[in-house]
Image (cartoon, rainbow, N blue to C red):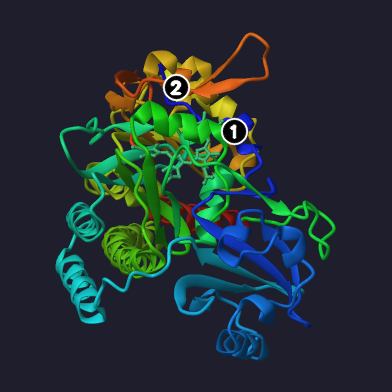
């Protein structure tokens, strides 16, 4: 069996942002930007303002907020602030609620925390917590260490029953690389979860919002009133708001995991989603806006630390590759015989440059080889197959037999293939072969059952078991690294320029 991409089309189309529903742990107020007139409210706002939704949508914002708060909002509008900002709103005589203020081109949105602020947390304690967490994270020097410390600190600060670090692979499956939890939760450390568990549109939301929280799985969804936003003439796009409701498939997923509350925090590498820190709680659990802000800061710290470590590692690989590549190119310049130049020191240099088991240089109808390469007959067939591709750029795969069935029997030596075209019209190539690495993936539940449809073909469910499901992976080599691909591209273009120079003479 081979690796599969489980980011199913189906899940990727599920609507998340235009559902006109929010979770019931807070209130949403939408007002016009120019006149501060209330346009839309979540239907539960009556609890907070003691006015019906019908009464609220004919009112000015000033009727329900204090003069001071309205003044602050006007300042935000004057400054055209692009990011959401935290606020404290005084509702009624003295009740203080945390809120998030969002400014859009035509309207503004207030997400107001349901419970009044308790004022339990002291700023100095909060700052000390953050500082301690940052210090510990900064002291680590590899991804594993950073992940372990990060989840330990987050668990300590938040009190979640379980916190885990989940790293995405190139197909968006995710592997749990660090975990801290009570015994009451299932262990997931080392397990891989299919991409469809958190489909593309859900992952994309983390590029806008650093975290997502679902404090109570069995919440009662609340509609916005009126249903149609008078400015956009459609449903309000809820993608930026924490309160956005949750699709039933994910609620069921949480139930199957035995958790009532979850929170996930993004980890970015170079602006791309690299992983998520996923927090679980057996009972409902609400993280207030202040604590969310702390999570937001720590998410940024963890992301930047992981990015630094990864780019340092990449840099080291690139530097080594660069040196070997320069050596080979240098010799090519000085020697007439490309075979000996490329395959210097018995070809060991080239083999180590690309971490491959064998290589073939097909040039002027002749073939030179080093290391372990497949049978000549197969190589001839492979060359014809490569010819048909009319390559103008390098070609690489870590699963050759998938692209070229005839390669199946040669999987041991040649599961990975890297082709550097020198002159594809003349069948001139430098070809490298990577051996198979047999591996087992420990899936968190059978990924082939990631989604099941009922007999009616419409209703569907996430898998109900996350029990370890082992999959043997065959016919795969290790994946080609970005730095190796870059080095191959440079070497290919150098070889082909050299070849063009030869023919011109
Ligand atoms: C959301 N799925 C999520 C989220 C996580 C996971 C972390 C983000 C929301 C949250 O923090 O709760 C998945 N959680 C995991 C995984 C682990 C974990 C893998 O702790 C590993 C230990 N889900 C399905 C199927 C579909 C699906 C079949 O299983 C689609 C048909 C969809 N998952 C789905 C959707 C969301 C989601 C739509 C977005 C929920 C939202 O943000 O509203």
Q: Secondary structure at mark 1?
A: helix
- Residue visible at 61% across and 62% down? 28
- Residue visible at 55% across and 52% down? 204
The residue carrying mark 2 is 463
* Looking at the image, residue 321 lies above or below residue 179: below
The image shows residue 460 at horizontal and vertical percentages of: 58, 21
Query: Is the residue indicated by label 2 positioned so its CB lies within 8 Å of ligand 1?
Result: yes
Label 2: how many Cα within 10 Å (few below 14, some 14–19, many 20+): many
Q: Nearer the viewer, residue 362 or 277?
A: 277
The image shows residue 443 at horizontal and vertical percentages of: 33, 26
Residue 305 seen: yes
Indicate which disc, 2 or 1, sits on the residue closer to the N terminus: 1
The residue carrying mark 1 is 11
| Disc marking residue 229 | none
Q: Are marks 2 and 1 in contact (CB under 8 Å)?
A: no
Quadrant in the picture for the C terminus:
bottom right
Q: Is residue 266 left or right of residue 130?
A: right
Q: Nearer the viewer, residue 235 or 113?
A: 113
- Residue 430 occupies quadrant: top left
């Amino acid at each position: 069996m081979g690796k599969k991409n489980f980011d199913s089309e189906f899940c990727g189309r599920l609507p998340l942002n235009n559902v006109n529903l929010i979770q019931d742990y807070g209130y949403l107020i939408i007002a016009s930007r120019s006149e501060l007139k209330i346009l839309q409210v979540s239907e539960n706002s009556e609890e907070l303002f003691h006015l019906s939704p019908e009464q609220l949508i004919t009112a000015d914002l000033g009727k329900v907020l204090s003069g001071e708060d309205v003044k602050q909002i006007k300042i935000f509008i004057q400054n055209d602030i692009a990011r959401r900002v935290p606020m404290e709103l005084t509702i009624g005589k003295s009740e203080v609620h945390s809120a998030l203020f969002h400014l859009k081109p035509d309207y503004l949105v207030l997400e107001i925390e349901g419970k009044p602020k308790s004022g339990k947390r002291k700023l100095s304690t909060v700052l000390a917590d953050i500082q301690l967490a940052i210090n510990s994270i900064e002291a680590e020097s590899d991804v594993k260490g950073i992940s372990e410390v990060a989840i330990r600190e987050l668990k300590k600060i938040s009190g979640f029953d379980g916190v885990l670090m989940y790293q995405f692979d190139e197909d968006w499956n995710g592997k749990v690389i660090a975990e801290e939890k009570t015994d009451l939760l299932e262990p997931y450390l080392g397990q891989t979860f299919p991409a469809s568990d958190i489909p593309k549109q859900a992952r994309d939301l983390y590029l806008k919002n650093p975290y997502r929280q679902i404090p109570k799985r069995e919440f009662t969804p609340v509609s916005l009133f009126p249903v149609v936003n008078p400015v956009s003439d459609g449903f309000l796009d809820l993608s930026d708001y924490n309160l956005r409701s949750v699709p039933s498939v994910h609620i069921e997923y949480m139930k199957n995991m035995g958790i009532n509350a979850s929170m996930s925090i993004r980890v970015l590498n170079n602006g791309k989603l690299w992983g998520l820190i996923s927090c679980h709680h057996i009972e409902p659990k609400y993280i207030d806006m202040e604590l969310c802000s702390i999570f937001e800061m720590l998410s940024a710290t963890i992301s930047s630390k992981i990015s630094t470590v990864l780019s340092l590692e990449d840099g080291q690989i690139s530097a080594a590759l660069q040196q070997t590549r320069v050596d080979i190119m240098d010799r090519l310049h000085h020697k007439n015989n490309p075979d000996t130049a490329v395959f210097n020191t018995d070809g060991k240099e080239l083999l180590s440059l690309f971490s491959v088991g064998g290589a073939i240089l097909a040039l002027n109808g002749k073939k030179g080889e080093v290391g372990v390469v497949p049978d000549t007959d197969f190589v001839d067939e492979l060359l014809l197959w490569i010819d048909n591709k009319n390559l103008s750029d390098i070609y690489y795969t870590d699963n050759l037999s998938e692209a070229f069935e005839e390669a199946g029997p040669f999987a041991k030596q040649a599961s990975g293939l890297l082709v550097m075209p020198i002159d594809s019209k003349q069948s001139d190539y430098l070809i490298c072969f990577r051996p198979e690495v047999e591996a087992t993936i420990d899936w968190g539940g059978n990924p082939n059952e990631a989604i099941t449809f009922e007999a009616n073909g419409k209703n569907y469910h996430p898998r109900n078991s996350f029990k370890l499901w082992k999959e043997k992976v065959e016919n795969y080599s290790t994946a080609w690294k970005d730095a190796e691909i870059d080095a191959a591209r440079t070497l290919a273009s150098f070889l082909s320029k050299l070849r063009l120079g030869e023919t011109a003479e």
